[in-house]
């Protein structure tokens, strides 16, 4: 079945063309470059993995509960609409939310792949080009994995959210070479990382947990790359140039906070757009979820040097300023550990199964003798 047949609502066009701006930059300086960035490049090479082999695609997924997250996370939970729904209807709602969430992850990963390729093209330093090339491959793998999960396990896709597409377009149209870093690495990827982590830690299903944990292990490197490159560059900018970038961050943060709420899902269940927005606004879980989405963005923005009074005021308004004191290094170390522990647990279980098979074979041979 083609992707087009799986879309709950067909995209307006089969492809999206964003006019490219800015310059492609070559560097004839083949010296070693920055030690930290080259170490990250080496790690990017060492940590490549194959989504067909590392993820156990034989694991079954319940069509009525693909992600295994609590029903309290659904916007309709506890409302009169929820009370009227049959268990079959609730299963369909869970399926639609899983499809919507992972579809946005899929579209975002394709956007990240394009932005990483744009960084390879436009960033002036060769060491940054080297690392961005490994990230482009990472993002391709992530899009492949999310696409496979949606095709084979969920059987349904949602088009890209208009506001996510708008922010992605603004990021790509800007001719300044640092904007794909800022728009994608800091805002879109930062928000996605927080969403990945919340689902990874809530789900009781092994397949989505594997997918999210392994992808987050890659994303920890991507965030580190953005921090290194932008921190170095933003030290050189004027106050006016920094304010321009802070305005971009403020607008992007409000857009993501207010518009990524899954209203499209509720509309597919016969709920009008305005009521769907109202229900989203009054969902206690969604309010908490929106706040936690900034747990990765705010400390990164502060770390790269965008921390003017106007930006801080916006974060006070959003109720997320305290995240500025969070340790990104600790969060990324945790992401690494979760993925590595999953590998250890899986390999230990596989080893036990092999030992048991050998023991059974020996016992069967002895009995036959």
Image: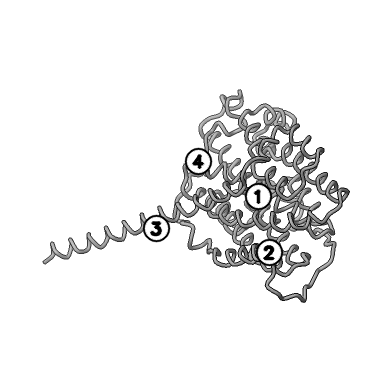
In the image, residue 142 sits, relative to residue 76, either above or below, namely below
Q: Earlier in the sequence, mark 1 or mark 4?
A: 1
The reply to whether residue 14 is in sight is no
| Percent of width and height locating residue 169 | 79, 53
- Give the crowd class for mark 3: few <14, some 14-19, many >=20 residues within 10 Å: few
Of labels 2 and 1, the one closer to you: 2
Determine the CA span between mark 3 and mark 2: 31 Å
In front here: 240 or 113?
Answer: 240
- Seen in the picture, residue 124 relative to 182 is either above or below; the reply is below
Label 2, on which residue?
132
Kindly identify which residue carries mark 4. Answer: 68
Distance from label 2 to label 1 (Cα)?
31 Å
The disc placed on residue 347 is 3
Image quarter in which the N terminus is found: bottom right
Please name which of the two marks, 3 or 4, marks the residue nearer to the observer: 3
Is the C-beta separation of discs 1 and 3 under 8 Å? Answer: no
The residue mark sitting in front, 1 or 3, is 3
Q: Give whichever of discs 3 and 2 has the lower sequence position.
A: 2
- Secondary structure beneath disc 1? loop
Q: Which mark is residue 7?
A: 1
Secondary structure beneath label 3: helix
Q: Quadrant of the C terminus?
A: bottom left
- The part of the image, by quadrant, that contains residue 38 is bottom right
**Disc on res. 363:** none
- Circle 4: element type: loop
Q: Is residue 4 left or right of residue 246?
A: left
**Which corner quadrant of the image does residue 90 belong to?**
top right
Q: Residue sitting at 53 percent across and 55 percent down?
A: 214
User: Residue 85: x, y in percent?
Assistant: 56, 29
Q: Earlier in the sequence, mark 2 or mark 4?
A: 4
Between the C-alphas of marks 1 and 3, the distance is 36 Å
């Amino acid at each position: 079945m083609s992707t087009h047949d799986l879309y709950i609502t067909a995209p307006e066009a089969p492809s999206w063309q964003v006019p490219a701006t800015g310059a492609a930059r070559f560097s004839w300086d083949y010296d070693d470059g920055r030690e930290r960035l080259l170490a990250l490049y080496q790690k990017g090479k060492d940590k490549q993995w194959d989504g067909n082999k590392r993820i156990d695609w034989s694991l079954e997924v319940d069509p009525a509960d693909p992600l295994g997250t609590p029903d309290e996370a659904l916007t309709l939970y506890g409302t009169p609409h929820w009370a009227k729904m049959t268990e079959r209807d609730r299963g369909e709602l869970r399926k639609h939310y899983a499809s919507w969430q992972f579809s946005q992850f899929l579209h975002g990963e394709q956007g990240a792949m394009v932005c990483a390729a744009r960084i390879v093209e436009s960033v002036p330093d060769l060491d940054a080009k080297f690392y961005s090339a490994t990230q482009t491959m990472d993002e391709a793998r992530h899009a492949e994995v999310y696409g496979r999960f949606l095709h084979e396990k969920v059987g349904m896709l949602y088009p890209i959210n208009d506001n996510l597409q708008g922010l992605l377009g603004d990021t790509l149209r800007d001719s300044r070479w640092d904007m794909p870093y800022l728009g994608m690495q800091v805002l879109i990827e930062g928000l996605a990382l927080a969403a990945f982590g919340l689902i990874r830690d809530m789900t009781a299903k092994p397949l989505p947990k594997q997918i999210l944990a392994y992808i987050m292990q890659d994303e920890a490197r991507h965030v580190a790359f953005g921090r290194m490159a932008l921190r170095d560059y933003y030290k050189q900018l004027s106050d006016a140039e920094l304010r321009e970038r802070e305005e971009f961050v403020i607008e992007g943060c409000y857009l993501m906070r207010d518009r990524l709420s899954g209203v499209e899902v509720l509309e597919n269940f016969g709920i009008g757009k305005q009521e769907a927005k109202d229900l989203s606004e009054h969902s206690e879980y969604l309010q908490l979820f929106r706040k936690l989405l900034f747990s990765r963005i705010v400390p990164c923005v502060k770390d790269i040097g965008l921390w003017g009074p106007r930006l801080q005021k916006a974060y006070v308004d959003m109720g997320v300023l305290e995240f500025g004191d969070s340790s990104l290094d600790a969060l990324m170390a945790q992401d690494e550990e979760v993925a590595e522990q999953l590998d250890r647990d899986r390999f230990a279980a596989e080893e036990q199964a092999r030992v048991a098979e050998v023991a059974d074979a020996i016992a069967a041979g002895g009995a036959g003798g």
